[in-house]
Amino acid sequence: MRVLAIGECMAELAPAPSDGDYRLGFAGDTFNTAWYLARMGDVPTAYFTALGTDALSTRMRAFMADSGIDVSAIRTIEGGTVGLYLISLQNGERSFSYWRGQSAARALADDATALADAMSGADLIYLSGITLAILDPAARERLLVALANARADGRKVAFDPNLRPRLWPDTATMTDAIMAAAGVCDIALPSFEDEASFFGDVDIDATADRYAAAGATTVVVKNGDGAVRYMIGGHRGTVPVEPVTSVVDTTAAGDSFNAGILASIAQDRPLTDGIAQACRLAAQVVQGRGALVPVDIARS
Ligand code: ADP
């Protein structure tokens, strides 16, 4: 199966060891998942977004391609640029400043034909709540219609709600949009803590039930270092997580976890196999710094 991830990749400026210097990198939730998938070597992975025509956009596209990701469907917006975030370190705590208002990625769903073309090359399509959050309401609707059409053509859709209230005008708009997307997905990959905060789920099964009721036939609920709960075709189960004691940075834990799940689905392996691999992958990622940790795939 070929996987297509849809969303926004941003330029990242992270503090370098020498004071006042910054290192340029590239990251973004759905992109991180595509990057981990591509590292597995045997899952053909494409990314769909919109980039600009400036030097930074060109560099980002080259980084994606060099990572083994198919960039051929990416839209180019004349005169556009990419979003940027900068990481500040104060007493060991990381904080983030964002400049994403003029990111070309916000136009990724402006052209229904480009969306349909990109999806036509994939068997499994992956997006997140952040993909939805950066779009205006009309573009969000266009994306949902394209996903529904792709499903009607036999493609599978996977969705991580990735709730980020700061990217939305208000909580109700966020939760409405998330559940609308849940209605066009086959596989839901929520995180319990976030879901409980914004949907009031009383326990982890309530999260799974809500996505199953929306139409997902496979739900995998992450829960930090707590056990993973899953539901597939109405059957529930639990996979224990071996807590990592030497956590360095949990950035992209969920994104890398999702790559493990998507790989197992793309390769038609049992879901429990995929969850176990996802846990091993994420356990390596939380022991490294940043979003893109050079994991040992053989150990996952
Ligand atoms: P998100 O990053 O989406 O909030 P979680 O924090 O729930 O997701 O973590 C995703 C996955 O990362 C978990 O299901 C687990 O497999 C792994 N993980 C996260 N924190 C730890 C930890 N301290 N020890 C071991 N695994 C962890």
Image (cartoon, rainbow, N blue to C red):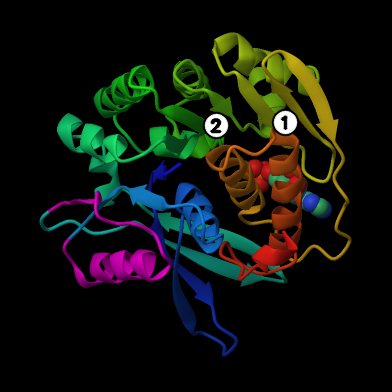
Ligand 1 within 8 Å, label 1 CB: yes
Establish if 290 lies above or below 149.
below
* Numbered disc 1: secondary structure: helix
Ligand 1 within 8 Å, label 2 CB: no
Which range is magenta?
A: 53-77
First in residue order: circle 2 vs circle 1 = 2
Establish if 140 lies above or below 19.
above
Establish if 67 lies above or below 147.
below
Number of numbered discs overlaid on the protein picture: 2
Q: Circle 2: is it few (<14), some (14-19), or many (20+) Cα within 10 Å?
A: many
Q: Which residue is mark 2?
A: 161
93 left or right of 124? right
Residue 192, numbered label: 1
Q: Circle 1: is it few (<14), some (14-19), or many (20+) Cα within 10 Å?
A: many
Tell which of 157 and 247 is nearer to you. Answer: 157
* Residue 21 included in the magenta stretch of the image: no
Q: What percent of the width, then of the height, locates residue 277?
A: 72, 50
Task: Specify the amino acid type for callout 1.
Answer: Phe
Tell which of 11 and 186 is nearer to you. Answer: 186
Q: What percent of the width, then of the height, locates residue 288?
A: 69, 69
Task: Specify the amino acid type for callout 2.
Answer: Pro
